[in-house]
Image (tube, rainbow, N blue to C red):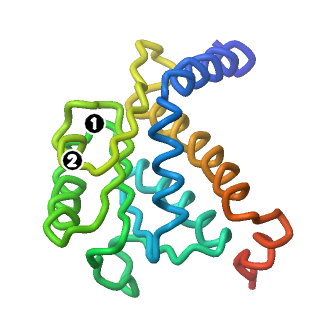
Amino acid sequence: MNFSEIFPKMIENIKETLLKVDDKTIDLSANILKDSQTIFVYGAGRSGIVARSFAMRLVQLGLKTYIIGESVTPIVKEKDVVVIVSNKGESFSSVQVGNIVRRVGAKLIVFTSNPNSKLAHISSVKVTVPAVSEDKNMPLGTLFEASCYILFDAMISILMNKLNESEESMRARHAIMV
């Protein structure tokens, strides 16, 4: 197979997955993020890369956002919100972070493909991204990660409207390239 054969199938898989995500959980998550004082994001592996890209856009919206695991990240407090991205919702580090978040009383928003996972059970808000595919051209967690990446960009658009932000105001907060 070549790119022109694989690409349309990938896009269709992502579209089918995202059309199954519950709008209410997305809107609830966006409202929680909009109203939060401090946001933290976490994910392991490629899910972590997707989470970091979401954090970058949250910062560009003017929201105080940190990535858990960075040396300059403060501790999570009771009034904070933590977003964890985890395909299966069972990875040790993600569950450990989730348990700490719940212990301190912060809100926990979990994006997972497994609505019955350990993380889903301890979440304040569970966003199920039902990324299940037998497509060999989307191995491992590719469908989940690609779907979350697009979902997060859609959430940024939702938040832009809720916060009355524009591309210009976001660009003013964009990292300076050296």
Q: Is residue 21 left or right of residue 105?
A: right
Q: Are marks 2 and 1 in contact (CB under 8 Å)?
A: yes
* Residue nearest the viewer, comparing 106 with 93: 106
Q: Position of residue 109 (x, y in %)?
A: 36, 52
Position of 21 relative to 135 (above/below): below
In the picture, which quadrant includes the C terminus?
bottom right
Q: CA distance from mark 2 to mark 1?
A: 7 Å
Q: Is residue 26 left or right of residue 104?
A: right
Residue 173 falls in which quadrant of the image? Answer: bottom right
Q: Position of residue 97 (x, y in %)?
A: 22, 62
* Residue nearest the viewer, comparing 47 with 95: 95
In the picture, which quadrant includes the N terminus?
top right
| Residue located 13% across and 67% down the image | 103
| Residue located 21% across and 47% down the image | 91
Residue on which disc 1 sits? 88
Please tell me how many numbered marks the rendered image carries. 2
Residue 78 falls in which quadrant of the image? Answer: bottom left
Dot 1, crowdedness within 10 Å: few (<14), some or many (≥20)? some
Residue on which disc 2 sits? 91
Q: Amino acid at mark 2?
A: Ser
Question: Mark 2 falls on what kind of element?
Answer: loop
* Residue nearest the viewer, comparing 114 with 32: 32
Most extreme residue toward the right is 168
Dot 2, crowdedness within 10 Å: few (<14), some or many (≥20)? some
* Residue nearest the viewer, comparing 31 with 4: 31
Q: Position of residue 123 (x, y in %)?
A: 25, 49
Position of 52 relative to 12 (above/below): below
| Residue located 47% across and 33% down the image | 142
| Residue located 56% across and 18% down the image | 16
Q: Amino acid at mark 1?
A: Lys
Question: Mark 1 falls on what kind of element?
Answer: loop
Position of 129 relative to 174 (above/below): above
